[in-house]
Amino acid sequence: MKKGKKYIASAELIEAAKYYDPDEAMKLVCETAKAKFDETIEVHVRLGVDSRHADQQVRGAVVLPHGTGKKVRTLVFARGDKAKAAEEAGADYVGAEEFVEKITKENWFEFDVVIATPDMMGVIGRLGKVLGPKGLMPNPKAGTVTMDTARAVNEAKAGKIEYRLDKTNIIHCPIGKASFGTEKLGENFVTLMGAIIKAKPAAAKGQYIKSCTVASTMGPGIKVNSAKLG
């Protein structure tokens, strides 16, 4: 694939074989975000676990201190007081069966996070095949299956992100926008990595963090020195 002039110029700022300290990496990733829009900064972490085994799964959620820079739209499945609490907390959509119908019949996906009370999981069970592949199915580990709908909405709006292994044992997560600058991105990065390290499964053997790379939407990857991550 042919690389653009901006990408090539950005790549020249990076030593391909070098592993950068986290602070250096955050500074470089901002410098290499040269697109006309405010690029998202993502972290890609390869772990020394096998996601095929249930006891080696790594999944959870964390609230980034500076959010992700993205406006988060929430859909809450709840009834009664819990529905009212979600509405008062600022949820974008609150309801029950009518949203199951809307998603299945209209292919409607005008939301970024789905929250549900435990009693609603039976109602939205048939959405598993469409929400699951998109990473939108509510999950207790991520705090999106809860009776405290107001808190879940507030956390989602504040910048709560979910991290989970893909089939190749890599976690991909946004940690903000290039406009955040080195300091805010660094604090978000440390928070995310701390959560991933804390979530290390007891069954994991050997080196846990195999590699860590940060990159902007259109920019090249920057290797982070995993020895400095804890």
Image: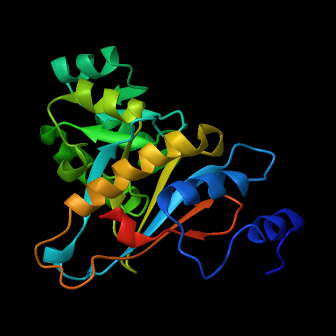
Rendering quarter of residue 24: bottom right
Q: Residue at x 27, y 48 (%)?
A: 138
Q: Residue at x 43, y 44 (%)?
A: 187
Q: What's the coloring here?
A: rainbow
Looking at the figure, which quarter contains the C terminus?
A: bottom left
On screen, residue 106 versus residue 205, left or right, reads: right
- Residue 109, can we see it? no
Whole-percent x and y of residue 198? 20, 59
| Residue nearest the observer in this picture, 80 or 52 | 52
Residue lying at the far right of the rendered structure: 5
Q: Residue at x 20, y 67 (%)?
A: 200
Image: 59 above or below 148: below
Whole-percent x and y of residue 222? 59, 68
Rendering quarter of residue 45: bottom left
Whole-percent x and y of residue 133? 41, 64
On screen, residue 1 versus residue 206, left or right, reads: right
Q: Residue at x 26, y 62 (%)?
A: 197
Looking at the figure, which quarter contains the N terminus?
A: bottom right
| Residue nearest the observer in this picture, 66 or 226 | 226
Number of marks drawn = 0
- Residue 75, can we see it? yes
| Residue nearest the observer in this picture, 89 or 124 | 89
Image: 202 above or below 160: below
Rendering quarter of residue 4: bottom right
Whole-percent x and y of residue 59? 26, 61
Image: 193 above or below 82: below
